[in-house]
Every structure is written in structure tokens, then in C-alpha cells.
Image (cartoon, rainbow, N blue to C red):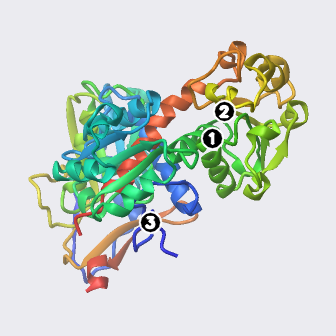
Amino acid sequence: MTSININLADHLPNVEDLLKTLALQIKPLLQANTALVGIQSGGVWLMQALLVLLENDIALNGVEHGILDVSFYRDDYEKRGLKAENRPSQITFDVENKHIILIDDVFYTGRTTRAAMNELFDYGRPASITLVALVNRGGRELPITPQMTAANITLEASQNLQLIQHADGTLSLELQPSLSKLQA
Amino acid sequence: MNNPQLDADGRLRHLLSIEGLPKKILNQILDTAESFVGVAEREIKKVPLLRGKTVCNLFFENSTRTRTTFEIAAKRLSADVISLNVNTSSQSKGETILDTVDNLIAMHADIFVVRHSQSGAAHFIAKHVPSHIHVINAGDGRHSHPTQGLLDVFTIRKYKPDLHNLRVAIVGDILHSRVARSEIHALTTLGVPEVRVIAPKTLLPAQVDKLGVHVFHDMKAGLKDVDVVMMLRLQNERMNGAMLPSAQEYFKTYGLTQEKLKLAKPDAIVLHPGPMNRGVEIDSSVADGTQSVILPQVTYGIAIRMAVMAMLAGGQGG
């Protein structure tokens, strides 16, 4: 099952369906010495869903998991300062020589991935990092791109695609005007 | 009213005292410190936030623990650090405080960490510096020691997460203690319902009850059923001023022993800002006992100071 290409005219895809696509792509990667790492917040919600979807393979291979909050590694700190809400990163396993599957919700500029990789290396030297994103929205600014995505959605810079977690725990994608457009 | 500690958007610009800081900012500092605790437990105990920034420790009064933890905190944020013991530098040759500060600004310092024996020294420097420079008060006279107050409530929150359900006693020389003042403001702002102070009358400031605390002169009544005991250092120089009969006498009445600690709740924790006078305000068996969180306070002090510096230094690029 490969990723789907979506036009703006279409409805935004159902996250449950996208997760199933992603789980099938990730499944062959789950071997011994693998760990899933979700990037706060959306990446963590997706990781939690994948832990359920891939429960058997994860248990079989002893796959570990952790959480990254990249607040302390962002390249816009100088401009924007520290965001009010940041949560501790939780990497309790040894990163050294692990195959890391890094999970993010919406891949855009690549700057979050860069921050996440820098942080991971402060825990140890992983054997490899595979970047998995639910959606690639285009617009990367760095030579970084996800190896696996469930959907490609081409968006204007003025649009902001967000993964939302509802009170009942379900996830959905929502399109919002970006902050910079609101200010304009 | 213009609050020099906050910028026009309500963000932290200087940390001068706990007084005047909204609960939201205090919680933001504590929550951010929570994230920094984990950094110290990693292989590489550094984050790149303050890369290229210069933190200047300006200590006009002696300190080991505070200066060291500020220095470590700045280094773990990847800042460059200069620590000046001003007693031994140009000040002794007659330079004014502001001249010292201006010279360091000319050397491109970004954050000043200031300790001074005069109350208001950090405010004075904060009023003087240009807007891109930040000042942290590391203790001024009898007035304030905000990062100590913050690390104390952070430590309490670690062991007793529900602050809205706590009885806290602060014991000792409240009169001369900037630590006590900062602790009281932090605890009451964060919603601790009952803060007690226990001290002889000679070591309590006038109108101490205006701070929203319950006053006790007797350890037996004051320690009864408290969740947290915060001891203060008895400054030896107070002994000379006829405020107290003798260290032995003080220990007998106000020193924290195992026996007195039994009056508190069985799971009560004991804090002390250091440096301790063993056998004066605290017995060694309590200081080293299972209820003591005195060393965790030091560890958490680094996380608190990292959080404050990280909140101050970012967001200046427009």
C-alpha cells in the first residue's frame, strides 16, 4: 500500500485510514533493536495509535518507544522564544546503535526533523533514523524528506494543516489559515 | 502599573522578585524546569538554546552554591559564562556598579545574574540596561531571592504535587531572610492554602501577618500536621546583635530534631536552602535523614535556573 496524492478540492483524508497505510509501511521495519519515537504532540498521538495497530510485531521484536519535545532545539528560538507549553522528552531506552523510526504528523519545512535529529544525537548515536510522516504537505526548506508517508497533500504557504486530537481520543486533520495570514 | 519584570506582551523580561509575577508565569517557569530535569539525566547534558549568548555572573556578595548552579545552568544551555567576584575586582578600585555593568555590556553580555548585599540592586541594574539585556536577581539584601523561592516550590511540587492541599511551615530567621520572603510569595501565589512561619519574636519582621501567613513562636504548635518544613539558615552574625541568647539555646528551641519533626505529618519533607549550620538550626540526623530533600533542592535549582534563562533570552529577534 503506497501513499495517496490528494488535491485540495478533495476532502481531507480520514486519519484512521492513513494510519492503517502507515502501519503497513512500518511493519517490515520492526525488528530487534528498533525503537519508535514520536515528536510532540501529533507524532506522539500517532505513535500511540501505531503501538496498538502493530501490537504483535512490537511485542515480538521488543520494540521500544519514546517521546521527543524539540522545544530546546528549534532554530526559531532566537525569534520566537520558548513556547509556553513544553513537555519533557522521554527517551528511557539506550539510543546507541538503535534503528529509530521517527514519527511526525505533518511534514513541512523539515526544520522540526532537524531539531529532532539533533536532540536524538544528544542521547546517543543511533544506527539509523527513518522519518515517517502521516502527511507530506510539500514546502521543504532543508535537504530532509520523509521516507514514508500515508498521503501527499499540496498546500499553499498560507494554509496550515494540523492534526487534532478530540476529547474521545480520535484524530482528524484540519485545515486552518496560517498565523502569518491572519496577521497580514 | 508598569512591571519591570514583564514586557509589553506579558512575557518575562527580568526576574527580580516573585512578588509581582502572575501565577501563569510562575507555573510556566516550573513546567519548563520539569523539561530541563530530564536534560541533566542524559549522556550529553546540554541543549543548544543559548549558543552564542554570554551570561555574566555578577556577585557583589559571596556565594558558592547559587553562583555554581547558575554557572552550570548557563553552560548546560550552551551559553558562555563569565563569573565575576566583584569584591576582588574593579569595584574595590572605586568603579561604580553601573560602570561595571556598562563595561560588560560593551563586551556583549546578554544576561546578568546579580547578587548584592543591598536590597534593590538588581532592580537598579535592570532599570539601567537596554531592552535586549536581561537581569536575574540572585539575592539582594533582605529583599528577594526569586530562583531560590522557585526551586523550593519546584521541589515541593515534585514530592507533593497537589499544592492546593498543603500545610507548609517556614522556620527560623524570617526577619533577615530574602529566601523566606520569596518562598512565602511563591507559595501563596501558587495557591498553597496554609503557610506558617515559626520564629522567635526578635526574628520576625513587623507586620509579618500581612504576608498572608500564620505566625507561631513555638515549634510544637507550629509543626503540628505540616506537610513541608522549610528551614532557614541562622546567620551567625545575628547572634552578636542580642537577638538571640546563644546557638545552643536556639537549637534547643527552634532547631529541627527528629523528635520535633515527629510532630509534622509522617511523610513530611524537610527543605533547607543551604549552607546548613548543623546543630544550630538543624540536627544532622534530620539533614541526612529519609525525609530530607536538601540535595534534590540543589539538583532542581539547576533546572529552575535553566528555565528562567531560557525564558528570558529567546524571542528577541523580532
Residues at discs 2 and 1 in contact (Cβ within 8 Å):
yes
Nearer the N terminus, badge 1 or badge 3?
A: 3
The reply to the same-chain question for discs 3 and 2 is yes
Q: Nearer the viewer, mark 1 or mark 3?
A: 1
Q: Position of residue A88 (x, y in %)?
A: 44, 44
Image quadrant where residue A178 sits: bottom left
Q: Residue furthest left?
A: A143
Mark number, residue B232 = 2
Q: Which residue is mark 1?
A: B177
Counting residues from the N terminus, which is met first, the one under dot 3 or under dot 2?
3
Circle 3 SS class? loop
Q: Residue at x 57, y 49 (%)?
A: B143
User: Relative to residue A151, is residue B67 depicted above or below?
Assistant: above
Of callouts 2 and 1, the N-terminal one: 1
* Res. B191 image quadrant: bottom right
Please, which residue is most extreme toward the top here?
B285
> Compared with residue B42, is residue B251 higher up or lower down, i.e. above or below?
above
Q: Nearer the viewer, residue A69 or B206?
A: B206
Q: Position of residue B181 (x, y in %)?
A: 64, 48
Where, by quadrant of the figure, is residue A120 drawn? top left
Given the image, on which type of amino acid does mark 1 rest? Ser
Where is residue B69 shown, x and y percent of the image?
41, 32
Q: Which subunit holds the residue at mark 2?
A: B
How dense is the environment of label 3, judged by Cα within 10 Å: few (below 14), some, or many (20 and up)?
some
The dot on residue B4 is 3
Callout 2: SS: loop
Of residues A106 and B263, the one drawn nearer to the viewer in this rendering: B263
